[in-house]
Amino acid sequence: MASDDADTLADLRIPADPDQLQRVRKALMSAATGVGFNAEDAGQICLAIDEALANVIKHGYGGACDRPIDMCIRRLEDGERCGIHVSIRDFGRQVDPSDICGRDLDDVRPGGLGVHIMRSVMDEVEYERAAEGGMRVAMTKWVR
Amino acid sequence: MSTPVKEVRKEGEAVVVVAQGEIDLRHSPELHKALVEVCSKRPKVLLIHLGEVAYMDSSGVGTLVEVFRRTNEYGGRMVLVAPTERVRSVFEITKLDRFFTIMDSEAEALGDDGGST
């Protein structure tokens, strides 16, 4: 992460349930606009985090809605610029981070678009295996 | 919101599906089910009105891609109508705006492709 001066805006645990997504997007929209993002960029941050959570629900936990997801939203300051950092941690299946990549968009088919969206709209997206099991993805976006 | 499908109606040889709300992992399965059911009747034109869809993620986009393929397979045509800026931007990010037929209004879509018999 590019800043040592980070303020935690939210630190929460949610169940891996699609019913949670709308509530999370609402909270993120509020956090992102509070940091200084315009409505369009805040909406894109919501989309990226939604995709990350959906990947955990579908692939990390295989649809088991009672499993936990930890999520931390922080405000970043780095000199004159500010941004938002969101980390999402699950306790599900581990995969090689180098295997997590977007696909060829010329191949018009359902699925596999979430990671492409995340990498397109956020400035930084980093996956890692968590030491105690599961995966962690950290995403950063700076106010333009 | 109780359902992502507000209305399904016939307009000549076209079927119009009016979607609504936030189409995410929670709601896209229901939209998928409704659209597959409409596709099974092989309408010449399947018009999906997105003007009341405030949000769509990749699960919703994936649903549209699958229906796009189904309609192409039987020789039909899928037209997306009046997507909001937020939904249109998801099509642009995923570069699906190059494949989907997107029109600004239902009248334009029906007039363009023989909605009337």
Image (cartoon, coloured by chain):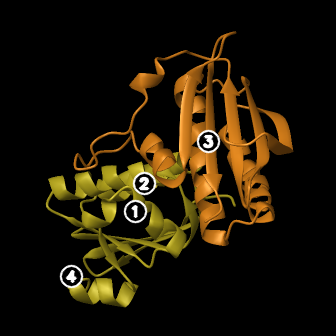
Chain colours: A orange, B yellow
The amino acid type of the residue labelled 3 equals Met
- The residue at which mark 2 appears reads as B61
- The residue at which mark 3 appears reads as A139
CA–CA distance between discs 2 and 4? Answer: 23 Å
- The answer to whether the residues at label 1 and label 2 have Cβ atoms under 8 Å apart is yes
The amino acid type of the residue labelled 4 equals Asp
Q: Is mark 2 on a helix, strand or loop?
A: helix
Q: In this view, does A140 lie above or below A59?
A: below
Of discs 4 and 1, which sits in the foreground? 1
CA–CA distance between discs 1 and 2? Answer: 8 Å
Residue A104 can be seen in this image: yes
CA–CA distance between discs 1 and 3? Answer: 22 Å
Question: What quarter of the picture does the C terminus of chain A occupy?
Answer: bottom right
The amino acid type of the residue labelled 1 equals Phe
Front one among B41 and A30? A30
Identify the residue at image location x=51%, y=74%. B85
- The residue at which mark 4 appears reads as B113
